[in-house]
Image: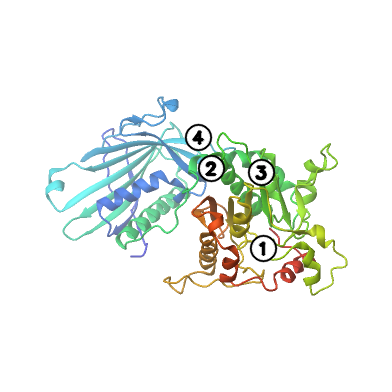
Amino acid sequence: MGFEPTQFGSDASPLILDASGAPWTPLFWHACTFNPAAFTKVMMNLIRNPNINSSWLFRADLLYENGSVLNEALEGASVLPRPASFTGFDLEQSLVRRLIPRNTLRDQPLDQTCLFYHSSKPEAQAGDHEQSMVIYIPHVSSPSEMPFYHPAVRGVAFLHEWNRNENIGRVSTHYCFFDDVERPPKLVRTAYHLLSTLHKHGQGTTTGYVKRVHHDVVVPQVPMQTTYARLKKTYARNLINTWAEVTDPTKHVFEDLSIAAFLIELWKQMYQGETFPGFVDIGCGNGLLVYLLRQEGYEGWGFDARKRKSWTNYNATDEATSDPEALPCLREHVLLPSIIMAKEEATKSLDHDTSDLDVDNILHDGLFPKGTFIISNHADELTPWTPILAAISECPFMMIPCCSHNLTGAKYRAPVPKGVDKSNSAYASLVAWVSGIADDCGWEVETEMLRIPSTRNTAMIGRRRAANVSDVDLDEIVRKYGGTAGYLDNVMKLVKVEPRSH
């Protein structure tokens, strides 16, 4: 069933009768095949996740639910629901949510009452027709108090009408307008959009839709987004204004701010009451993530095969140290895992001239102090090596795969996992392939779909072992996944070419 709603005429009679006499204007309706139970389920999901309807919003925090204040620190008049009564309906559920905007410098949070109703007419209970309704009432008294992300109306209503005999119904949107206030076209478009979202999600329930992506599995949404908002407010403007790369600063800055927020909250879980062991960002690219984490007080460093323009800015605090022996936090290294060969053998194995390179210093053996947290963020050639390096040094890790390479450092199309539809995306296949390496290395892999502006947003975390390192044959794992023939020459070419933009 496509979405082609019908707009009510300007002379249409109200379908909702407010006991207070306040008029509710119908705007759009559309036929539907999802029943009252599905309507209630969808509306509850939309209430808990307002970001589905508006990209301006992070989330909603529930303050009150069915007689209980959920956060005593917020108890007060604004937390209690705004009452409303409607002819022919019984109130079944009351909630108050606080809408949290993405940009708190521009918009303020908004408290809003959400009320669930059901038919109270005897003929509706016994006959073939029933109605369900959800009302949103923002806690403001005038349009001037309304934030940008909410329609400037006194209330929004969603009405679901259902014919039990024919298993068909319709959904509609309604506004309770402020008195004597201009009604711009934007309000009508918003009502259309709200109905479209409701219809899409409702119809999805009838076709057996199962949510494919689950966020906030490892780190809860609220603390992660709270930390992200703080980081964004603290760093974003200056980072964008001083961006040294040729790439789009907004994408990279906001993406790394989000990843930094996730790591900070993850580390709070992992190292509560303990000393942070330090981190290393392998394939650190422009170095922004290293810079942000260090600014937040986490000791660590990063390396890549080629220095980036940004490093001059992000290394400044380290180079200004009073310790003349201190190394910069961003360094040029090519990773040569110790499991492949020793550095002493490397120069003999290379098949191209390296006379202009300090090979001994540029090569890193991938051995880190036990417990060091390894970050592998879009590290490309180093991605499949991440769980292996972590096992060798007994270090936890997080990797976010991007471009696909195998253990030789060559570009590689990961095979579609057995038993999976052949249409599986190349990225999904890469994630499954790398996850298989981590499993074989004895890691208990946790997966989080990060809220970042990238389709390459799967984070795999290894912080717990499913098998002892001593019980894992790493050499056999390397052979199983294609071996390492040609690795050194492949990665040394990175020193000779222009670096990736990240």
Gap in angstroms between the C-alphas marked 3 and 1: 23 Å
Asked if 439 appears above or below 25 in the picture, the reply is below
Q: Amino acid at mark 3?
A: Gly
Residue beneath disc 3: 278
Judged from the image, the secondary structure of the residue bearing numbered disc 4 is helix
The answer to whether 72 appears left or right of 226 in the picture is left
Closer mark to the observer between disc 4 and disc 2: 2
Q: Amino acid at mark 2?
A: Met
CB atoms of marks 4 and 3 within 8 Å: no
The residue closer to the viewer here, 447 or 47, is: 447
The answer to whether 285 appears left or right of 135 in the picture is right
- Asked whether the viewer can see residue 426, the reply is yes
Gap in angstroms between the C-alphas marked 2 and 1: 37 Å
Residue 264 appears in which quarter of the rendering?
top right
Judged from the image, the secondary structure of the residue bearing numbered disc 2 is helix
Q: Give me the residue at 67% from left, 68% from top.
A: 409
- The circle drawn on residue 144 is 4
The residue closer to the viewer here, 86 or 407, is: 407
Q: N-terminal of the two: label 3 or label 1? A: 3
Q: Residues within 10 Å of mark 2 (few under 14, many from 20)?
A: many
Residue beneath disc 2: 224
Gap in angstroms between the C-alphas marked 4 and 3: 49 Å
CB atoms of marks 3 and 1 within 8 Å: no
Residue beneath disc 1: 339
